[in-house]
Image (cartoon, rainbow, N blue to C red):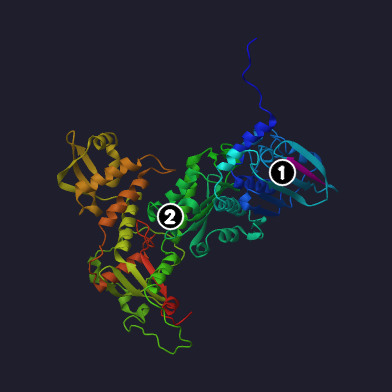
Amino acid sequence: MSKSYIHILPPQVANQIAAGEVVERPASAVKELMENSVDAGAKRIVVRIEQAGKKRIEVEDDGMGMSPADAELALQRHATSKIESSEDLHHIASHGFRGEALPSIASVSRFRMITCSKDSQEGVEVRVDGGLNTQTRPAAKRKGTKIEILDLFLNTPARLQFMRTDKTEEAAIVEVFKGLALAHPNVAMSLELDGRKRFDFMVQSEEARVLAIMPNDFADNFLPQTLEHEGMQVTGYLGLATFHHRDSTRMLFLVNGRVIRDKQLIAALRAGYRDVMFHDRYPVAVIRLDIDPAAVDVNVHPAKREVRFKSPQSVFSAIVGCVRAGIERMGQTVASTTTDKALHAMQSSYQAPTPVAHSSMPRFVSESTANYRTQASRQVPQDVQRLLFSAQGNPQYAAEDVLDLGQPLAQIHQCYVLSQTDEGIILVDQHAAHERMTFEKLKSQLSGGKVAAQMMLTPESLELDGESLAWLQDNQNALNAFAVSVSIADDETVLVHSVPAMLSKEPPAELVAELIESCMLLGIEAEGDKTGLGRILERWLGNRACKGSIKAGRTLRHEEQVNLLREMEKTPNIAQCNHGRPTYVRLSLNDMDKLFGRKE
């Protein structure tokens, strides 16, 4: 008889292996216990942490609790109250469902649970030390469940060696707590770290909970937006395009109340902001997606951080559509942080004087602009129509507020236009503003399929490398959407026959070379429910609009300054240029009073 090399692992070893997948660090244990509390219908959850969870984790709730029999059974692998058959896996609406968390945690810690069901007159206490000895005894009646974890990873020293510093592990716990608090504003939650109360959230509305968790200045720089698409609902709390961050840590996603960190959702959110934000900056936003549980598989990641959608393209389109709808409403608003940065820059250059109480100093107002709203100069004279800017071709949109950029006072260093409004002053970056205006006109023409072509009297030759020429042979018709027509002359050369009329003053060879480069880099495959031309549009036309715009260093006559401001007021997404920089900064009278020490 041959020797058998395969055997069944002891339950303790199996639980420790499962713990390696489910409980990566103290934050993982906090997440599992808090999710169990939410699933138990808790209205209040209290989390207490000592030494970043390495010494002690305690989670207490007022949920439905458990009977003595259920409390013991809950520590067995694959024991759960969430599902009963394989069919239930296709309609998961709870956080937990595998029945692995409690036995996995108990196998690598000193575990203590006190619980009591609502209809019981006596509670039960269950103790487990390192997954070995399970002790059960009666306990006083209480509401809900309290679980205490001591000396996490006490019998897995290898895992302890990979633990990070207390500050790092504590930060991970805070992020887990904030994510679950964000997902469940109808549950009061508090977090104590080494006896210090870090968070204490009462039951509140979703928007109030979002503002409590996001950075402080988010409240002044966001816009709520909802969208229904193919049976799913997207609710977004969207930061302004000029209110961005250096990385993706402030992009938060909730799918059916579950906190998700998923690359395809991040890509969708960034795609929505693409043409109003520089490529190396990230939006600040909270996205909640409510979708049929049958259309999303949450059982694809050990820690349930990622999901798989039945129709990922529909989800992508829904998120992009929600963001674009929000941007259309916020398009002319600049984040308040731009004003704060401007004030900080000016204040740091000198020592502010002491505020003068009850100052009787008069405010000086330019005679030519004091009543600009009633003056005829508000109307653009007929002879100004020949200037660079034209109102034709601007797309319509529904902004939240009408933008008023006032009346120009002066041009500063041939780079900025200073204007006055009823509320204060505005400083406009002339190049950034015209860059956005040019881009929006080009984008409007392309999206409407009506890009006017300028035929060339003599075709211009363009030399391409072998890879570019091979791509062009297979995708020559893709350039037609951009009013670009080419023909292949030989193995190295193509002839350019037409370019967009709006860019006819640009070097044709350089223009077409950049278009081909953008197509090859980004691809022309479909994006959501649209073609991939949008990606190319934003990269190629963004660069061309930059090159074809008013440059810093050009003198603008007063009429041109007026026309620039009026055109800005009619242009969507004018708050930022194609690279995400603000096009104007607003300083109110109150801001200036503080700057000059007239107010605290």
Q: Is residue 304 visible?
A: no
Residue 362, horizontal then vertical, whole percent: 40, 88
Judge from the rendering whether residue 372 lies leftward or rightward of residue 188; answer left or right.
Answer: left
Q: Secondary structure at mark 1?
A: strand
* Dot 1 or dot 2, earlier in sequence: 1
Q: Nearer the viewer, residue 341 or 506?
A: 341
Outermost residue to the right: 121
Q: Secondary structure at mark 2?
A: loop
For marks 1 and 2, give the CA distance.
Answer: 40 Å
Outermost residue to the left: 458
Q: Nearer the viewer, residue 2 or 231?
A: 2
Range of magenta residues: 123-128
Residue 5, horizontal then vertical, whole percent: 61, 19
335 part of magenta stretch: no
Residue 46, horizontal then vertical, whole percent: 69, 55
127 part of magenta stretch: yes
Label 2: which residue? Answer: 246
Judge from the rendering whether residue 501 lies leftward or rightward of residue 398; answer left or right.
Answer: left
Label 1: which residue? Answer: 111
Residue at the spot x=45%, y=67% of the render? 336
Residue at the spot x=55%, y=53% of the render? 167
Judge from the rendering whether residue 415 lies leftward or rightward of residue 145; answer left or right.
Answer: left
